[in-house]
Image: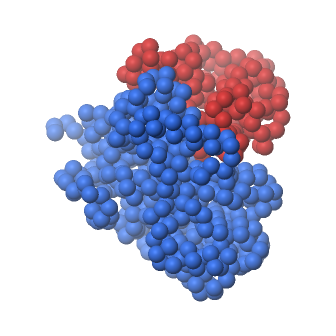
């Protein structure tokens, strides 16, 4: 089209959802493809929702997940669940109780090029499939459920080019921590992060999801990886209705698209990293902390960041070699979804973990947000594969959370101290 | 009085995850900063200001962080910058989240907001500070939230106010 300037992938997707070519800085009222909330944020959206309407705009495009505390661990949450079930029944919309919303969305629902609004800050995770998946508060999602629309300022994009090949024992989580260390907790605020480069092309869909997930901790409005053959194969195997079209092939930034910033990372020399309490960018090499002998009370292998089958496989390899875990360290394994749980069961991981002394829980958010399944007490130390080490996040404000890869978490469960995983792999 | 906070105050500190299981704003007001600043919920008075550094409200999307602060009847949150979702939640609930240079504001400084002129007067120090306050936030504040605005004017109105 004459006069049409080159666009970023985010600008393209926004343009597809508001009927005109738009660019960073434009204000749009966009049509949403899918809207979701979960067992806490949904409770808070009921009041604004009913003030606007008594019916959802499209019952096939609204989803509710019970993942943050399911099954209900106390009476207050049971009341939340009951109110939300009533709402879902009345609206004839499903409640999905089979794991963390972001993982189930990737497994079953998200399509490339979609614009999705979710009442959860880790919604950018879904960008691993080449969609724009944006987190919001409950009121915005109430408006989305009522009208199918949301207003946005079209965001600028930070392009992050990742090249090189990870050394053995180093994982995508370590790459995420490196980026967090570099750009900080505000570095992507209001912006889209587009991950690209040879390394990203070689990352699996799930590895990409670890990166898009962690962009939330840098404030990103969304994170995205362009549609490619990997995404195509993943979707062909999982969606009855997926066909590659000219449209999906166009889901990439134009050559002369305007970026806010371009950052490059060569990950070839990267070491296993850890984010120390209580900030995501308080990042250091695990090796440098080993001499401090940081005693670990709990290891949490779970969350929307790192509890997929590949993550459980890495932990399995570490444990398989030594066939033990430290007796004074609690190991809690919470698979991200039912699909992950069943696959881990099929491969014999769950039996193996359980016999080692681990507690394997039902799929969901688990201990990540301090509501159930592994709340920390004063002065306790947890090595977690999640994405938040905020003070008080997993329980007592006097507990200390270290964020690390599944390999580092597993190695630390073996020794009982924060441990570089490379001697176990 | 002004409650002074630093950078990157996350919503887990404002309403901790295991305590914010309520939809009643007055209940949520009792747990604001319960562990991070225990005196806050006991001593905060209406018309007080919350004053912070960069990236206030980062982390979880939980709207309780805004509902709870609003239920404390504070006048506004002043910060050098806000995390995106928290900022939208403030717009949606009619809580003033005002971007300004908070570097030199102290606990006992007497502050006055002039919303029309978009100025924050620090009467104690005799300084006028420029503030960032989009039309949408101001209109929503005056209407008591975004829902009354939508009911009155429709969704398109929001984008016109944002531009």
Residue A233 shows in the view: yes
Residue at image x 67%, y 54%?
A372
Residue located farthest toward the left when viewing the structure as drawn: A2
* Coordinates of residue A286 in the picture (x, y in percent): 65, 72
Give the position of the N terminus of chain A as an image quadrant: top left
The chain painted blue is A
Quarter of the image for residue A78 reads top right
The chain painted red is B
Give the position of the C terminus of chain A as an image quadrant: bottom right
Residue at image x 79%, y 54%?
A398
* Coordinates of residue A68 in the picture (x, y in percent): 58, 50
* Coordinates of residue A38 in the picture (x, y in percent): 52, 44
Q: Of residues B112 and A356, which is closer to you in this image?
A: A356
Quarter of the image for residue A237 reads bottom left
- Is residue A191 rendered to the left or right of residue B111? left
Q: Of residues A126 and A184, which is closer to you in this image?
A: A126
Residue at image x 55%, y 67%?
A174
Residue A194 shows in the view: no
Residue at image x 61%, y 57%?
A366
The colouring scheme, among rainbow, by chain, secondary structure or one colour, is by chain
Q: In this view, does B150 lie above or below A329?
A: above
Q: How many marks?
A: 0
* Coordinates of residue B10 in the picture (x, y in percent): 65, 43
């Amino acid at each position: 089209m004459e006069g049409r300037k080159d666009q970023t992938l985010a600008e393209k997707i926004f343009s597809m959802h508001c009927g005109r070519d738009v660019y960073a800085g434009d204000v749009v009222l966009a049509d949403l493809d899918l809207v979701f909330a979960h067992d806490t944020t949904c409770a808070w959206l009921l009041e604004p929702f009913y003030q606007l309407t008594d019916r959802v705009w499209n019952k096939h495009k609204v989803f509710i997940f019970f993942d943050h505390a399911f099954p209900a661990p106390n009476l207050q949450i049971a009341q939340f669940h009951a109110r939300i079930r009533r709402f879902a029944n009345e609206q004839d919309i499903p409640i999905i109780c089979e794991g963390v919303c972001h993982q189930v969305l990737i497994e079953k629902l998200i399509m490339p090029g979609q614009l999705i609004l979710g009442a959860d800050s880790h919604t950018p995770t879904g960008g691993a499939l080449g969609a724009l998946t944006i987190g919001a508060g409950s009121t915005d999602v109430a408006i989305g459920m009522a009208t199918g629309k949301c207003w946005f300022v079209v965001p600028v994009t930070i392009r992050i080019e990742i090249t090189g090949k990870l050394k053995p024992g180093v994982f995508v989580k370590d790459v995420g921590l490196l980026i967090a260390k570099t750009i900080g907790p505000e570095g992507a605020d209001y912006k889209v992060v587009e991950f690209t480069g040879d390394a990203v092309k070689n990352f699996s869909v799930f590895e990409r999801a670890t990166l898009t997930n962690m962009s939330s901790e840098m404030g990103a409005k969304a994170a995205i990886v362009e549609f490619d053959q990997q995404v195509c194969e993943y979707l062909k195997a999982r969606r009855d209705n997926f066909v590659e079209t000219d449209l999906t092939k166009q889901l990439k930034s134009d050559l002369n698209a305007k970026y806010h910033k371009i950052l490059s990372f060569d990950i070839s020399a990267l070491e296993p990293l850890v984010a120390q309490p209580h900030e995501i960018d308080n990042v250091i090499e695990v090796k440098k902390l080993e001499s401090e002998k940081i005693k670990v009370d709990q290891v949490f292998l779970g969350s929307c960041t790192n509890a997929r089958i590949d993550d459980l496989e890495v932990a399995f390899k570490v444990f398989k070699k030594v066939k033990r875990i430290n007796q004074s360290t609690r190991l809690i394994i919470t698979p991200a979804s039912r699909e992950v749980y069943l696959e881990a069961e099929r491969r014999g991981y769950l039996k193996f973990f359980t016999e080692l002394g681990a507690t394997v829980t039902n799929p969901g958010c688990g201990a990540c947000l301090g509501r159930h399944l592994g709340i920390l007490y004063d002065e306790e130390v947890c090595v977690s594969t999640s994405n938040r080490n905020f003070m008080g996040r997993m329980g007592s404000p006097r507990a200390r959370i270290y964020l690390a890869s599944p390999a580092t978490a597993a190695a630390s469960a073996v020794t009982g101290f924060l441990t570089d995983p490379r001697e176990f792999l | 009085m002004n409650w002074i906070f630093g950078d990157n105050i996350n919503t887990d500190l404002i309403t901790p995850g295991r305590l914010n299981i309520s939809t009643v704003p007055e209940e949520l007001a009792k747990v604001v900063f319960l562990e991070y600043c225990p005196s806050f919920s006991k001593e905060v008075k209406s018309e007080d200001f919350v004053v912070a550094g960069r990236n206030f409200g980062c982390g979880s999307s939980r709207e309780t962080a805004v509902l709870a602060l609003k239920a404390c009847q504070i006048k506004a949150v002043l910060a050098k910058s806000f995390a995106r979702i928290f900022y939208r939640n403030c717009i949606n609930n009619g809580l003033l989240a005002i971007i300004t240079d908070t570097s030199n504001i102290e606990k006992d400084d007497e502050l006055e907001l002039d919303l029309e002129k978009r100025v924050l007067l620090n009467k104690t120090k005799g300084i006028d500070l420029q503030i960032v306050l989009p039309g949408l936030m101001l209109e929503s504040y005056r209407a008591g939230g975004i829902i009354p605005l939508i009911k009155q004017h429709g969704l398109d109105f929001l984008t016109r106010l944002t531009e």
